[in-house]
Image (tube, rainbow, N blue to C red):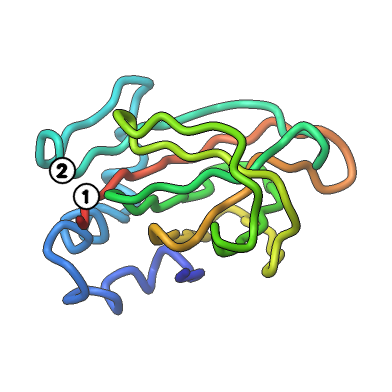
Amino acid sequence: MILARNETAQDYLGIHPNLDEALRRITPEFLSGLGTDRVDIIPGEVWCTKFTYETIPDSESFFEAHEKFLDIHLMLSGCERVEIASPAALRQFDSKPENDFYAYHGEGAHKLVLAPGDFLVVWPDDAHKIKMMLDRPETVTKAVFKVKIH
C-alpha cells in the first residue's frame, strides 16, 4: 500500500512500467479533463475511470482484491474511510476471476481516510474496503486507475 499526496506521485516512478504510466497522469490537467467515460492509457493494461457516489455505512461495504491489477484511488472531492487487510486474513465470499475480482468479509488491519488530493495504491495483496462514510453519507468523486502488474 502507498498512501500519498498527488503532488508526490512522481516520487514513486520506477517500481513498474505500467504504474509509471498511471503516476505520470496524476496531474491537475489530466484529472480535470476526466469525464464519465473510461480513459484507456494502455489498452488492457492501464486505464482510468471517474466515479461519483454516496459513501455508505461500514456494514454495507466489503473488501475487494485483485490478482493481476493494482488500483490507484484518487480523491477528487469528498472524503471516505478505507480499510486494508491481507486477503489471507479475510473470508472470501465471491470471486470473478475473469474480471480479476475477489470479495471478502473480515476486519481491516489498517484504517485511513482519503481526502481530496490523496491517492492510495493498493497492490494485489492489499484487499481494500472502500466507500465508507465518516460521520454521515457524503457525495464523493474519485478517479481510479487500474494497472496491470502480473
Measured from the top left, where is residue 5 in percent x and y?
Answer: 48, 68
The residue positioned 42% from the left and 63% from the top of the image is 6
Measured from the top left, where is residue 109 in percent x and y?
Answer: 69, 68
Dot 1: element: strand
Figure quadrant of residue 103: top right
Q: Left or right of 28: which side holds 103? A: right
The residue positioned 35% from the left and 24% from the top of the image is 35
The residue positioned 67% from the left and 69% from the top of the image is 110
Give the mark nearer the N terminus: 2 vs 1.
Answer: 2
Mark 1 burial class by Cα count in 10 Å: few <14, some 14-19, many 20+? many
Viewer-nearest residue: 4 or 61: 61
- Amino acid type at circle 2 is Glu
Measured from the top left, where is residue 10 in percent x and y?
Answer: 26, 72
Residues at discs 2 and 1 in contact (Cβ within 8 Å): yes
Image quadrant holding the C terminus, namely bottom left
Dot 2: element: loop
Q: Left or right of 49: which side holds 75? A: right
Q: Write down the residue under mark 2.
A: 45
Q: Write down the residue under mark 1.
A: 148
Viewer-nearest residue: 68 or 31: 68
Q: Is residue 54 above or below residue 131?
A: above
